[in-house]
Amino acid sequence: MTSERRLGRGLEALLGQPRAEQDANQPIGEPDVVRPEIPSDNGLLLVNVYEIDTNPFQPRTEFDENEISELSHSLGEHGMLQPIVLRRDGGRFQLISGERRWRAAIRAGWSEVPATVREADDRQVAEMTIVENLQRKDLGPLEKATSFQQYLQRFQCPQEELAGRLSIDRSTVANLIRLLELPAEVQQSIREGKISAGHGRALLPLGEEHEQVAFAKRISSEQLSVRATEKLIGEAIQAADAGPLQIVGSDGTHKSPSPAAQHLTSLEQELRLALGTRVDIRQSSKGRGKITIHFTSHEEFDRLRGQLSHGDLPDARAG
């Protein structure tokens, strides 16, 4: 005996006004009456809303209350046209997709919701959740980035594998995850819509957090476009790199760079833009030198290692 039962009739007949009015009087949080399963040909179940748990791979942490209320009203008027998707989890169920509809159904006073139950392991659920979220226009880039990062950490796989399993370009994965390297204050500006994800990616080559925060505030106050931001940041990097390039003589003294070595400054800037972090190049008068790539966290190091190992240097404006 379980508290689920198979749908033997259409959704409208089962979830029409009489049923909604009956369930509206039932306090939220109380379990529904236990019923036996009844065979059906349509493969759907009616599942007790209080026996459903949230999706542990769901990157969305906040749900708009007004949106849930509007959806709840729509359910009362038209019923649930698209069932939620679940998987079994012991004696309970776990959401794969449809959390907003589930929340709205509870708000509407429903005790049961129509559902499709799938057999899926953790990795499959994580992938289905990511795919659903990628298709949602109202899910922010940082939430999408978080879902990518959590997947990579949980299942210990490279970005190429995740991109392949989702049938998306690797640069999409890389460019979104790079946003998580931005300072918390800049990330909050992206969440609030003060700057876009494109602006955030343009800030990455600056390297220093205080510079990124200052530029983010300038973008917001001056309403700069992404292209204008990239131009200003490129100029700032070029100005900052004008001094550090030094030619070291055999006697250890510093000499002015020769015209042939001047191109290293532009190369520094090019690498900064490609890698999204600070890069320094030093060269001696004999032609020997070193390239220093800076990172500020383990996550950034892993990202840089992946890019360098696979020769994939994404365009700062891509994705």
Image (spheres, rainbow, N blue to C red):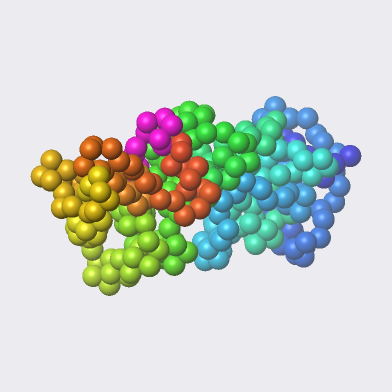
Residue 97 visible in the displayed image: no
Residue 298 visible in this rendered orientation of the protein = yes
In the image, farthest residue toward the left: 259
Q: Position of residue 182 (x, y in %)?
A: 43, 58
| Majority secondary structure of magenta residues | loop
- On whether residue 171 falls in the magenta region, the answer is no
Residue closer to the observer: 144 or 98: 144
The N terminus, quarter of image: top right
Q: Residue at x 38, y 46 (%)?
A: 293
At 60% across and 36% down in the image, what residue appears?
A: 156
Most distant residue in the front direction: 251
User: Magenta stretch?
Assistant: 307-319
Query: Which residue is outermost to the right?
Result: 1
Q: Is residue 158 left or right of residue 26?
A: left
In the image: residue 243, left or right of residue 32: left
305 left or right, relative to 127: left
Please give left or right for residue 98 compared with residue 301 in the image.
Answer: right
| Magenta span contains residue 311 | yes
Task: Find residue 174 and report its horizontal and vertical position in percent.
Answer: 42, 41
Camera-side residue of 127 and 177: 177
> Where does the image place residue 216, in percent across and percent down from the top left?
33, 65
Instruction: Residue at 33%, 49% (x, y): give it.
Output: 279
User: What x and y, as percent, mark residue 283?
Assistant: 26, 43
In which quarter of the view is residue 31 placed? Answer: bottom right
Question: Quadrant where the C terminus lies?
Answer: top left
* Nearer-the-camera pick, 284 or 316: 284
Counting the numbered discs, the total is: 0
